[in-house]
Image: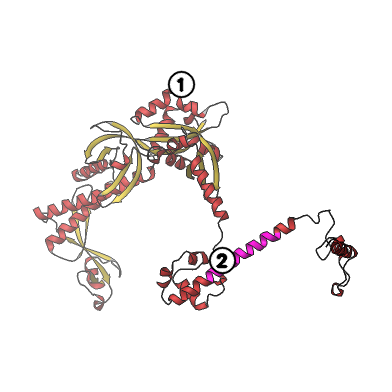
Amino acid sequence: MASELYNTIDALSREKGIDPQIVINAVEDAIVVATRKYYKTQENLRAELDKETGKIRAYAVKTVVELPEQVEDPLLQVTVDDAKKVDPNIEVGGELQFPKPTEGILGRIAAQLAKQVIFQKVREAERDTVYNEYIGRVGEIVNASIKRIEGPDVIVDIGKAEARMPRKEQSRLESFAMGERVRVVIARVDRASKGPAVVVSRAAPELVQHLFQTEVPEIYDNTVVIRAIAREAGERTKIAVMSKDKDVDAVGACVGMKGMRVQSIIRELRGEKIDIIEYHEDPVTFAEKALQPAKVSRVTVIDPMEKHLEVVVDDSQLSLAIGKKGQNVRLAAKLLGWKIDIKSEEEKRQEVEQQMSQLVTPTATPLESVPGLGEGVVEKLTAAGVTTVEALADMTPEQLEAIEGIGPKTVEKISLAVNNYFSSLEAGAVEDAAAEDNSALPAAADGAAPAEGGLPVEAQEAQPENPDSGEQPAEAEEQSAASEENG
């Protein structure tokens, strides 16, 4: 029959939900501490609890060595010859126990010390039990009752342990009363020095998912599947659902007749807004749905690898699409798992115009392209951050003289070189324009094709065979004679 002490230990173990042997070990360790304090010894002490009688025996344990010179510490070691005087069957390497009287050792101070050791061991065991109980249940929904409120935190009872609900894990719409029953999500379990801290949440998306599974039979039997949830507790939740049965409307099933199902969930969440969206594999279509109630003009996939979308909406829909403090587009991005850039039609038009203007902007010309600028001058200008002809042309003489190593004469040289450079560019542009005009002229007035000399064929034939001979064509001679007669 078990002793009264053992029965007390067994009852304590069941109350704390820990192994009785852990408490027994704690009691034995406490007796060891008290015995060592009483005898003021550094011996290797052990204690044993007799379950039948309830007595606790203490022993000094020594290791058996063969030779006397091997005894380094008489408190911890004993020769085999001395050991055989106590136990004839002892062997080298074994352990010999020397009983220590325990009657009267548990004085007031020793008893207090033993009590502290027992409580410490029990608390440690309790921490491990709670940690092992809840570490595998993270994300699970449990029923809890409000136990007390400590500042911004709410302490709840979840069965075998107390849990803490910090302010950031609460909905701003909710307030709690002592003893109130609530459903919470086990968010995490921390192994803290003061004990395992079980943190629960009413702000986690898993709570909304659980509520829909409870209220919507089609979700419970897996006819309708919740594909994604994005939530900002106390503000708005977007939930994407998909039906596996073509005859079942996923959104309609979640809303319920006259909105009864979703209204029940909204009441549980103290009035939090819920948007139910039909899930689509196509990110473009899904983005259009996710940004409701705003109407989207068009969606463009910018980078499928980086999951980047650009959404363009009408100017009047921009604020609605973005939402209060960016909430609508932020939740839509969480729901999709894509980055969303949202722009109005006007912003997109301006962006396109800017891109077009950049395309027609002339490229920067390096300083080396300007004849007349020596290498030394180019180096000084480059060191000062002037690397293009365009930047150089925009500088005043005073700005040039401020550059180290450039004086007034060098400034004149730079100005002359830059002016000549731009003049040559303008002259080249004029020549190109003239060449284009000449190429656009007709070959000849009467349509005759130009010959190699660039003149019409008839004009070439009218030319004298030998221009140096001074002979004139016949028609020219007749005209000359006629003019002399008239004169």
The reply to whether the magenta stretch includes residue 418 is: yes
Q: Earlier in the sequence, mark 1 or mark 2?
A: 1
**Residue 35, picture quadrant:** bottom left
Depth check: give the residue in front, 278 or 2: 278
Residue type beneath disc 2: Phe
Image: 440 above or below 367:
above
Tell me where residue 75 appears, x and y as whole percent.
19, 69
Q: Residues within 10 Å of mark 2 (few under 14, many from 20)?
A: some
**Residue 197 is at least partly visible in this image:** yes
**Residue 98, picture quadrant:** bottom left
Q: Which residue is mark 2?
A: 422
Tell me where residue 318 appears, x and y as whole percent.
45, 38
Judging from the image, what secondary structure is the residue with disc 1 in? helix
Q: In the rendered view, does 17 fall on the left or right side of 288?
A: left
Residue type beneath disc 1: Met
The reply to whether the magenta stretch includes residue 392 is: no
Q: Residues within 10 Å of mark 1 (few under 14, many from 20)?
A: few
Q: Which residues are magenta?
A: 417-435
Image: 475 above or below 218:
below
Q: Residue furthest right?
A: 474
Judging from the image, what secondary structure is the residue with disc 2 in? helix
**Residue 401, picture quadrant:** bottom left
**Residue 107 is at least partly visible in this image:** no
The number of numbered discs placed on residues in the rendered structure image is 2
Q: Main secondary structure of the magenta part?
A: helix
Depth check: give the residue in front, 96 or 107: 107
State the residue at coordinates (57%, 55%). Answer: 360
Q: Quadrant of the C terminus?
A: bottom right
Q: Which residue is mark 1?
A: 257
Tell me where residue 106 appears, x and y as whole percent.
12, 54
